[in-house]
Image (cartoon, grey):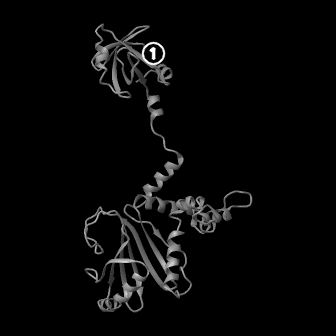
Amino acid sequence: MYPQALSRVVAVQPLLDATERDPGGASRQAFENLRVGQTVSALVRSQTRDMALVSIEGQVVSMRLPRSVESGETLRLRFAGHLPQPVFTLETPEADAADAPRLSQTARMLSEIMQRVPERTPPTLTPPAPLLAQPPASTAELALALRNALVRSGLFYESHLADWVDGRDSLDGLMREPQNRARAEIAARALPDGEAGLKQANPLHGLLTQQLQVLESPQFIWRGELWPGRTLEWQVQRDDGDEANDRPTRTGPSADPAWESRLRLELPTLGALDVHIRLDARQNFSIRLAPAAAASVPLLQAGQPGLLDRLAAAGCTVQAFEVARDAGA
């Protein structure tokens, strides 16, 4: 253990010149293989008032060390290079603590949040109210509502801030995102004297957790009502082509990045229906409709030509289309 006096003297890591003790320059040659920053152990063989004999890497050299160092003590030295003689810095417990990486308060908070996140669980967005007050008059109205539910979910808020700075997003749109609505709620809970009201969990913490999950694994689930009484579960995930080509919407092996959607809904005539949609990097769609009821298969097949015509009119290139029940349904 380092004496207390030594800790005070070398806390700033003073440079210690290692001078050659032998005339042939063997000490310099012995240190030629050391890398700058490499740590080595040094055994103090003897210590006088001015110089100490130290054994480093099997080579005995003389050094000027603090007087508090005692013979027989083992030191940690860090190689600093040749100036032109070998130069070392003396490592101490205080120096080790100072060199240790320190996380900021924000980094510690993010680390704690991620430790509480269940593994392999995609974030789930659950809106408090239906997207529409009544069934839509057109598919365009429903598509716009779904788009706004995703875009203004708060998952991509920081990206939208950058878009706003560049003039590609509106302030009104930003104000509709949960980050700004939550701040208004927090401000409303504050008492007139500035003190916090009832202690409640910050609503932004949950959203921050979801943002971190999406960054780690690009996928999420939207689960809610399209209009009163009509529910939808919509799962979106990025497919980088790393998994086996066993997905039902794949038409062949491909390493191109793609996005996959899976929609689960309950329809009055068709009943429970799963819709698998894959959009590859070339903007080609692969679609698979999987009804739970066998009687729904011919109904969907009968409507397939009309659906493909509408998709083509909308500019969608459909590479594959299939109607089939899932195995075990």
Q: Residue visible at 34% across and 20% down?
A: 42
Q: Residue visible at 50% across and 49% down?
A: 107
Q: Residue furthest right?
A: 193
Expressed as whole percent of the image width and height from the top left, the position of residue 164 reads 59, 61
Q: Residue visible at 41% across and 88% down?
A: 267
Can you say which quadrant of the picture contains the C terminus?
bottom left
Q: Residue visible at 57% across and 66% down?
A: 178
Quarter of the image for residue 101 reads: top left
Expressed as whole percent of the image width and height from the top left, the position of residue 202 reads 57, 61
Quarter of the image for residue 306 reads: bottom left
Give the residue type that dot 1 points to: Pro
Instruction: List the residue tagged with mark 1.
Output: 66
Can you say which quadrant of the picture contains the N terminus?
top left
In the foreground, 269 or 301? 301
Q: Is residue 55 above or below residue 182?
A: above
Expressed as whole percent of the image width and height from the top left, the position of residue 185 reads 64, 66
What crowding class fits label 1: few (fewer than 14 Cα within 10 Å), some (14-19), or many (20 or more)? Answer: some
Expressed as whole percent of the image width and height from the top left, the position of residue 276 reads 35, 77
The answer to whether residue 201 is seen in the rendering is no
Q: On the picture, is 26 further left or further right than 108?
A: left
Q: Is residue 61 above or below residue 78?
A: above
Q: On the picture, is 140 further left or further right than 57?
A: right
In the foreground, 133 or 312? 312
